[in-house]
Image (cartoon, grey):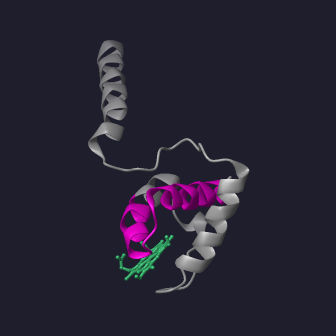
Amino acid sequence: MKKIFAIASFTAVLLASCTPKATTATAPMASTSTAEQIAQGKTIFENSCTRCHKLPDPTAHTSVQWVGIMNSMAPKAKLTDEQHQWVYDYIVSVKK
Ligand code: HEC
């Protein structure tokens, strides 16, 4: 039983380590932005993400869900890859 569990969790680790390659997400999970870029992300978020709907609540979704949301919303808001990253990092920074 113990062995089966060990194999199962090893498989889970393998699967987990493969997931980032499977998605084409441009936003890595770890924040690489400086405080300045995160501040810019906040400004972009407040200005660009209110055009079509009210400002979303960063705490309403997990950081993983936000990767997907940003992948569909960044093109709608016509963000560059950098702006996409900064807005994502701002959202994640609010959640902590
Ligand atoms: C061009 C219009 C437009 C812009 C700009 C826009 N959105 Fe959206 N957004 C939508 C529409 C339409 C929906 C609902 C349909 C959908 O989910 O695609 C939506 C839904 C959402 C949702 C709910 C998704 C869910 O799964 O519940 C979130 C969160 C969100 N947007 C965040 C953002 C953020 C963050 C930005 C700025 C980067 C942004 N949106 C910019 C049109 C827009």
Dominant SS in magenta:
helix
Where in the figure is residue 57, as x and y percent of width and height? 59, 72
Q: Is residue 59 rendered to the left or right of residue 15?
A: right
Q: Is residue 13 magenta?
A: no
Q: On the image, which quarter does residue 41 sit in?
A: bottom right
Q: Is residue 71 magenta?
A: yes
Q: x, y (%) of residue 84?
A: 49, 60
Closest to the observer: 9 or 89? Answer: 89
Residue 42 percent location from the top left of the image: 65, 67
Image point (71%, 55%), residue name? 36
Quarter of the N terminus within the rendering: top left
Is residue 11 shown above or below 71? above
The quadrant of the rendered image in which ligand 1 is seen is bottom left
Rendered location of residue 77, percent (x, y): 44, 75
Quarter location, residue 55: bottom right
Q: Which residues are magenta?
A: 68-95
Q: Residue at x 35, y 17 (%)?
A: 6
State how many labels appear.
Answer: 0
Instruction: Report whether 54 appears left or right of 69.
Output: right
Looking at the image, residue 30 sits to the left or right of residue 26; the answer is right
Q: Is residue 67 above or below residue 74?
A: above
Residue at 62% in and 47% down: 33
Q: Is residue 71 left or right of residue 35?
A: left
- Residue at figure coordinates x 54%, y 58% from the top left: 88
Residue nearest the viewer, comparing 81 with 62: 81
State the image quarter where residue 3 is shown. Answer: top left
Work out whether 74 lies above or below 9.
Answer: below
